[in-house]
Amino acid sequence: MNALVAACLEDPEARVSACPDWDNAALLNHVIGVWLFANAQVKATNPEKPTRPEIIEGLNDLDLKAKAHIASSNLYESLALCDPTQPAWNWSPDLTCAFWLRRMAHETAIHRWDAETAIGKEAGLDPELSLDTVAEVVEVMMQFQFSGPITEFPSGSLHLHCTDADGEWLLTSSGSDLVVTNEHAKADVAARGEAANLALWLWNRGDAGVEFFGDEELLRSWASLAP
């Protein structure tokens, strides 16, 4: 969290390549909103419906640094104290705080990469965390999003293979469902690379370091399901 905030504040006007309409200030405002929303869901322990973030008196009068400090500190404390099994609303079938622990780790890591890349810093992603970033995309985000479940998938299969960690996924569509298995298998198309590079590709942050096999249009169709 601190690294993301620091990069955004180092040059608030730096453009974010993955989000062309944003500069680092807009990116940080987005992240602050996400942190406040996630914190509200964790604290509410209500899996039935989303909870509005609490109104923090004077928050809108503060500068970005102060807002980010409040939002990040509150979320960090809530996640540190929560039982991962306690109820919490979200848009996946796993209506527990475990969803938010995972979601915020990856959301923050990817946007830290955005902010550091924007200021010309050589940004990197932790290999172990990146492995779970890939897993979260295929297990959750390609199927369940805030706007609702995804029910249309490409007709061809996709195989993902991490070259620096023990991670392989086979994605096939079955009607309106996505079937994900962890196996080494031949698919219609495939993407192969280090976990961090696969994670960035799935998050539409470019394809550097990723080797592709098969039809380009089908690969793009799979990638379009990710955030």
Image (cartoon, rainbow, N blue to C red):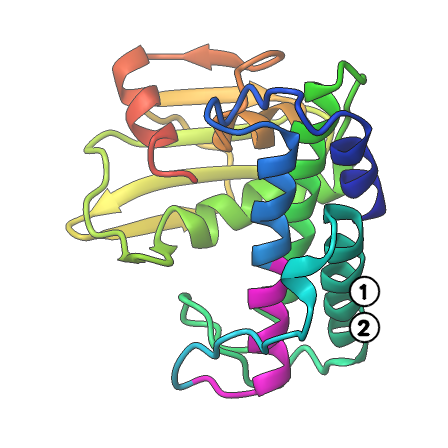
Q: CA distance from mark 1 to mark 2?
A: 6 Å
Report if the CB atoms under discs 1 and 2 are less than 8 Å apart: yes
Amino acid type of disc 2?
A: Glu
Percent position of residue 47, x then y: 46, 84
Q: Quadrant of residue 25?
A: top right
Amino acid type of disc 1?
A: Ser
As drawn, 214 above or below 97:
above
Percent position of residue 108, x then y: 68, 46
Q: Quadrant of residue 200?
A: top right
Q: On the image, numbered disc 2 is attached to which residue?
A: 77
Around disc 2, counting alpha carbons within 10 Å, would you say few (fewer than 14), some (14 to 19), or many (20 or more)? few
As drawn, 75 above or below 126:
below
Residue 215 seen from this side:
no
76 or 96, which is in the foreground? 76
Q: Is residue 154 magenta?
A: no
Answer left or right for 155 relative to 77.
left
Percent position of residue 133, x then y: 61, 43
What residue is drawn where x is 32% and y is 12%?
216
Q: On the image, numbered disc 1 is attached to which residue?
A: 73
As drawn, 213 above or below 10:
above
Q: Nearer the viewer, mark 1 or mark 2?
A: 1
Q: What quarter of the picture does the C terminus occupy?
A: top left
Around disc 1, counting alpha carbons within 10 Å, would you say few (fewer than 14), some (14 to 19), or many (20 or more)? some
What residue is drawn where x is 37% and y is 58%?
146
As drawn, 78 above or below 207:
below
What residue is drawn where x is 41% and y is 71%?
93
Q: Quadrant of residue 70?
A: bottom right
Percent position of residue 173, x then y: 25, 43
**Dot 2: element:** helix
What is the span of residues highlighted in magenta in the rendered image?
35-47
